[in-house]
Image: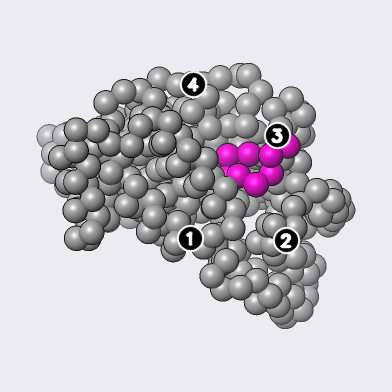
Amino acid sequence: MPMSFAVGQLIRELRESLGWSQSRLASEVCRVAERDTLTREDVSRWENGKRTPGPFWLRHLASVLQIPRETLEDAVDRRSFLTTVAGVAIAPLVTSDLIERGFAAALRSDGPALDDWLETVDTYGRDYMTAGAAEIQRRLAADLVVLQQQLDEPRMWAVAAKLATLYAKTFPGSDGAKAVTWYRRAAEFADRSGDLETRVWVRGRAAIALGYEGASLGVANILAGQAIELDDRPTLGRVNAIMGQAHVAAIRGDDATALTLVEDGRRVFDRAGTDDGESDYAVPWWRFNVFTSLLAARMGNDRLALEAQDEAHHTLPETLPRFRTHLEMHRGLMLVRSGDRDGGVAYAQSALNELPAEKHSLTLRMLMDEIKS
């Protein structure tokens, strides 16, 4: 991928996470730069990779996009996305029942205790593995409204970070705004908590989610890189971050880097992997192999894909049929990659149809779109 395109893709993803048009971005940059020479057309050329912003515009782009200047400079100069992404303002879903719950929590002398919130986090981690995105989103929106009234200590910010990460996963990463915005906000919440493990996990989880979905690849690399830089100890967050980077590399056609990253991820997994396979906060052996299976299918590496699928099937719990659907759909993608488009699409669609609709995730739907395209 040309570097100008990678930089442009990153600018577009960050702009859209703010909900801004190209004209709005141009106007904001002109305001902070105290110049009126930047136009919507210039922004469009940057985002489409036709031109690369120079140092002057990079400095002011970083300011209005709310990220350190080095983020964009690294993207140009060193092909690196290893710096912090600052948060952007987000409002919760505004409906009458959510507003009522929020005010009710504010009026109470005490809300749910920290232990109650920690139990809530664990419950969502388990429920995410089987429940549909719409159900999780509705429940999380209500709980986030209540939780925001209680953010008076670091451990509550850690709770908010983990719940916000799952909330982000209920939006399609390909929409360029909501999911990325919530991932960035979750990272900010984690920083407020001061808990290093949470800071790494949130960023790593966002990176593998976006990488697996094939969405917002520049942001995925930023968050993965930051997770890796924050702490070099073997943790689940680091496993997720490395595998997120591997998917980005595979999608961008850099198979050698992708395979090297998978090997790195396996070494970290061997020290940090978990046996608890029925929570979104866990990375057991079967889940590591689900990550690897899709990556290999995307590269057309059938040998690695089949090995990963076989390993995943050995330990994947029967209570998690959605992830068996993932593996079957990866086989559909393999058929498409081998040249049998109709057969591959039919195979993947059949696998998806066998899973009850209420159990479908946004990731499965995006995978189906990828196979069709």
Judge whether residue 102 is colored magenta.
no
Q: From the viewer's perspective, is residue 55 above or below residue 331?
A: above
Q: Is residue 190 left or right of residue 59?
A: right
**Secondary-structure class at tag 3:** loop
At 34% from the left and 52% from the top, the residue drawn is 141
Q: Are marks 2 and 4 in contact (CB under 8 Å)?
A: no
The CA span between labels 2 and 1 is 17 Å
The residue positioned 13% from the left and 43% from the top of the image is 36
Find out whether the residues at labels 3 and 4 contact each other: C-beta distance under 8 Å.
no
Who comes first in sequence, dot 3 or dot 4?
Answer: 4
Query: Disc 3 designates what residue?
Result: 274
Instruction: Looking at the picture, tell me which residue is in the foreground, 36 or 151.
Output: 151
Q: Is residue 75 visible?
A: no
User: Which three-letter amino acid code belongs to the residue tagged 3?
Assistant: Thr
User: Could you tell me which secondary element the residue under label 4 belongs to?
Assistant: helix
**Counting other residues with Cα less than 10 Å from the Cα at mark 4, is it few (<14), some (14-19), or many (20 or more)?**
some
- Give the residue type at disc 2: Arg
User: Judging from the image, what secondary structure is the residue with disc 1 in?
Assistant: helix
Q: Which residue is mark 1?
A: 133
Q: Callout 1: few (<14), some (14-19), or many (20+) C-alpha neighbours within 10 Å?
A: many
- Spatial CA distance of label 2 from label 4 is 33 Å
Separation of residues labelled 3 and 1 (CA atoms): 24 Å
Name the residue: 63% across, 26% down. Answer: 235
Magenta residues span 275-282
Residue marked by disc 4:
196
Instruction: Name the residue nearer the viewer: 42 or 275.
Output: 275
- The residue located at (15%, 40%) in the rendering is 107
- In percent of width and height, residue 13 lies at 39, 49
Residue 29 in the image, given as x and y percentages of width and height: 21, 40
